[in-house]
Image (cartoon, grey):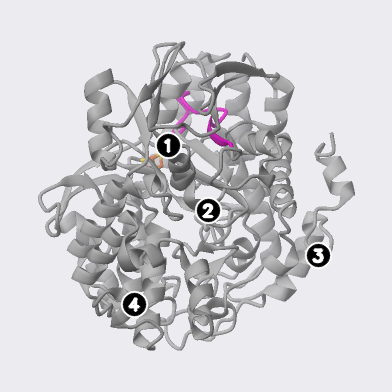
């Protein structure tokens, strides 16, 4: 495999260049967010104003993105986060990454700020910056439709909506139009908006190079039936199909994380209910045999009648149980609005839940909201708030800055209701239900991200921990060996971000373990990499991202749980009484990582990982 080819664009000067990255750098950092972290760390973008011209924005394909390996579809979008002020990354599926790969480029590095709205057009080797003033103000669906009309149906578009244009801190970068896939987290939409970059359009015709095509095809033929069988629930009901099981485990956020059970509500807002009511069709990302995407009909709200991407599990909990809303139609309409406006559904629902609790306790009043009574479960209010947040208007402009800033402004009890770590709102899996998630959330590089370890999957045996050499006993609510689960899974999940693989592949258990994945890399590149090499690369990139944020002052003091999750127990449900003893687990965790007691990677560890060069 040739070295990585990166397109470099400076929006301030209009200059366009090409950079070849040496193969050795790829072997160390693979691709995706790991390779992006290497570029941004070396460039010292941690010193930049996140919304200023010096904050470099990177679209980076995974090393395997665009190959026929199942679910090899992901592109990472990385920069210093304007929401958290530290390392920021978000990953999107769909078809953008595969199309980018066919242009011959592995990534796009975007610097500077345009004087007026632009979009970037990349067609094979032809690169152009084009006027986007007629697109500015359009929503995500409209932008994709317009650009596909202009450049052909085969092009793929990644763009921002009105939220990104207005630099809303919880906005994302979206792809796929109505069948939206989102790089939602950490405010990458705001970074793109600050650069006045409305969209990136890609169209490629090159064949993706594969070193040992026959061998790879044989391996895929063997693997596909395994993952199809193990992930059948995802195929049938999407990610939201797991919602009732999550509720039964006490793992759901209910009423801004304050309640323990919600059985009837879960049955009304889950993937199975979607299948019975608003479901239209199945769809999947590039090269995906699982096809967890579900098109649904939006029945209410300003866009009733639309057929679009259905709500994922996180969205169903966020706009459902989290807000005590049992109306699936409200969830679908809120999801559609977020996708049109270019908002992260997790953070948007999180900040609305926080505001509802503040309102209930008199910390926010009708004077603050412009006359709205923001009560639990009120569907009209939920949709109105999403619109206001996305347009950064009225009371929405207060919420659009995220839970941490909004709660700091109100102070006092409002901070008790704020559920965030390092400034990122929690994804909807409760660390009191599976305590390895407490370590995961507290130490995750981008803030309260569930995907950096997927500890709740590992603890339930969805993935075979034995494939990572782990066979120790543990209890769901206990502390023993939980740090090790988080540590191993973080290193392993980092690999998926770096290779561009969907994390649902781990449902194939040890058939998707490090050795199997290393075999795929060897077939694609000819490198002869081992499973151990791969885990080392995951560890390296995880530490590199920690170092990026350490340069911004992140240490042990930031590796915390919010009071709601770390001090208060639930009174009912399967996680009743559980409080994760984070302090004990962190001692184990830092020891495993060979970090200091202050949570700083030791010189010895950095040297061993080759991060001092
Ligand atoms: S499992 Fe779902 S998210 Fe993952 S690649 Fe397939 S369709 Fe996309």
Name the quadrant containing residue 246.
Answer: bottom left
Q: At 31% across and 65% down in the image, what residue appears?
A: 394
Mark 4, residue position: 368
Query: Disc 3 on helix, strand or loop?
Result: loop
Q: Earlier in the sequence, mark 1 or mark 4?
A: 1
Q: CA distance from mark 4 to mark 2?
A: 35 Å
The circle on residue 598 is 3
**Residue 540 vertical placement versus 97 (above, below):** below
Residue 67 painted magenta? yes
Q: Which residues are magenta?
A: 56-72
Judge the density around disc 2: few (<14), some (14-19), many (≥20) Cα neighbours within 10 Å. some
Q: Residues within 10 Å of mark 3 (few under 14, many from 20)?
A: some
- Ligand 1 positioned in quadrant: top left
Instruction: Give the side of residue 435 with respect to residue 130, left or right.
Output: right
Disc 2: which residue: 451
Q: Is residue 62 magenta?
A: yes
Q: Which residue is the site of mark 1?
A: 196
Between disc 3 and disc 2, the foreground one is 3
Measured from the top left, where is residue 314 in percent x and y?
38, 59
Q: Is residue 600 above or below residue 74?
A: below
């Amino acid at each position: 495999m040739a070295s990585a080819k990166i397109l470099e664009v400076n929006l301030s000067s209009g200059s366009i260049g090409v950079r070849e990255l040496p193969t050795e750098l790829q072997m160390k950092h693979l691709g995706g967010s790991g390779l992006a972290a290497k570029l941004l760390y070396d460039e010292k973008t941690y010193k930049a104003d996140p919304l200023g011209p010096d904050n470099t924005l990177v679209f980076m394909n995974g090393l395997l993105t665009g190959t026929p390996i199942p679910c090899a579809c992901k592109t990472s979008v990385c920069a210093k986060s304007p929401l958290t002020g530290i390392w920021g990354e978000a990953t999107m599926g769909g078809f953008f990454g595969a199309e980018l790969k066919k242009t011959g480029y592995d990534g796009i590095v975007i610097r500077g700020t345009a004087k007026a709205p632009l979009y970037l057009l990349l067609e094979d080797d032809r690169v152009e910056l084009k006027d986007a003033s007629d697109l500015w103000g359009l929503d995500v669906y409209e932008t994709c439709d317009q650009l596909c009309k202009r450049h052909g149906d085969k092009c793929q578009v990644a763009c921002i909506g009105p939220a990104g244009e207005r630099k809303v801190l919880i906005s994302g970068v979206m792809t796929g139009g109505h069948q939206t896939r989102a790089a939602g987290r950490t405010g990458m939409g705001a970074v793109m908006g600050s650069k006045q970059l409305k969209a990136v359009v890609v169209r490629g015709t090159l064949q993706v190079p594969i070193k040992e095509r026959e061998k790879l095809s044989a391996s895929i033929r063997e693997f596909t039936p395994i993952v199809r069988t193990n992930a059948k629930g995802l195929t049938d009901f999407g990610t939201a199909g797991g919602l009732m099981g999550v509720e039964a485990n006490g793992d759901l956020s209910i009423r801004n994380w304050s309640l323990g059970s919600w059985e009837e509500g879960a049955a009304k807002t889950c993937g199975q209910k979607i299948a019975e009511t608003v479901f239209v069709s199945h769809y999947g990302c590039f090269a995906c045999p699982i096809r967890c995407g579900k098109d649904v009909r939006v029945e209410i709200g300003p866009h009733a009648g639309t057929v679009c991407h259905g709500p994922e599990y996180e969205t169903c909990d966020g706009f459902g149980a989290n807000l005590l809303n049992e109306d699936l139609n409200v969830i679908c309409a809120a999801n559609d609005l977020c996708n049109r406006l270019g908002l992260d559904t997790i953070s948007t629902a999180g900040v609305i839940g926080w505001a509802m609790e503040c309102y209930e306790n008199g910390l926010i009043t009708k004077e603050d909201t412009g006359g709205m009574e923001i009560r639990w479960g009120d569907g009209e209010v939920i949709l109105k708030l999403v619109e206001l947040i996305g347009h950064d208007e009225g009371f929405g402009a207060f919420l659009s800055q995220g839970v941490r800033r909004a709660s700091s402004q109100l102070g006092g009890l409002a901070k008790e209701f704020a559920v965030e770590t390092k400034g990122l709102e929690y994804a909807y899996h409760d660390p009191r239900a599976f305590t390895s998630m407490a370590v995961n959330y507290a130490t995750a590089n981008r803030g309260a991200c569930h995907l950096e370890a997927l500890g709740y999957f590992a603890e339930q045996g969805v993935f075979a921990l034995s494939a990572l050499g782990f066979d120790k006993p543990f209890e769901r609510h206990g502390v023993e060996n939980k740090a090790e689960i988080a540590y191993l899974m973080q290193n392993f999940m980092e690999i998926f971000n770096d290779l561009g693989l969907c994390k649902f592949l781990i449902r194939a258990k040890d058939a998707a373990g490090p050795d199997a994945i290393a075999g795929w890399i060897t077939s694609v590149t000819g490198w002869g990499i081992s499973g151990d090499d791969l885990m080392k690369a995951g560890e390296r990139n995880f530490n590199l991202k920690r170092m990026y944020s350490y340069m911004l002052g992140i240490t042990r003091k930031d590796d915390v749980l919010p009071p709601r999750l770390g001090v208060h127990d639930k009174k009912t449900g399967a996680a009743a009484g559980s409080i994760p003893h984070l302090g004990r687990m962190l001692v184990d965790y830092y020891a495993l990582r060979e970090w200091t007691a202050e949570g700083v990677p030791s010189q010895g560890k950095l040297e061993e990982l080759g991060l001092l060069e």
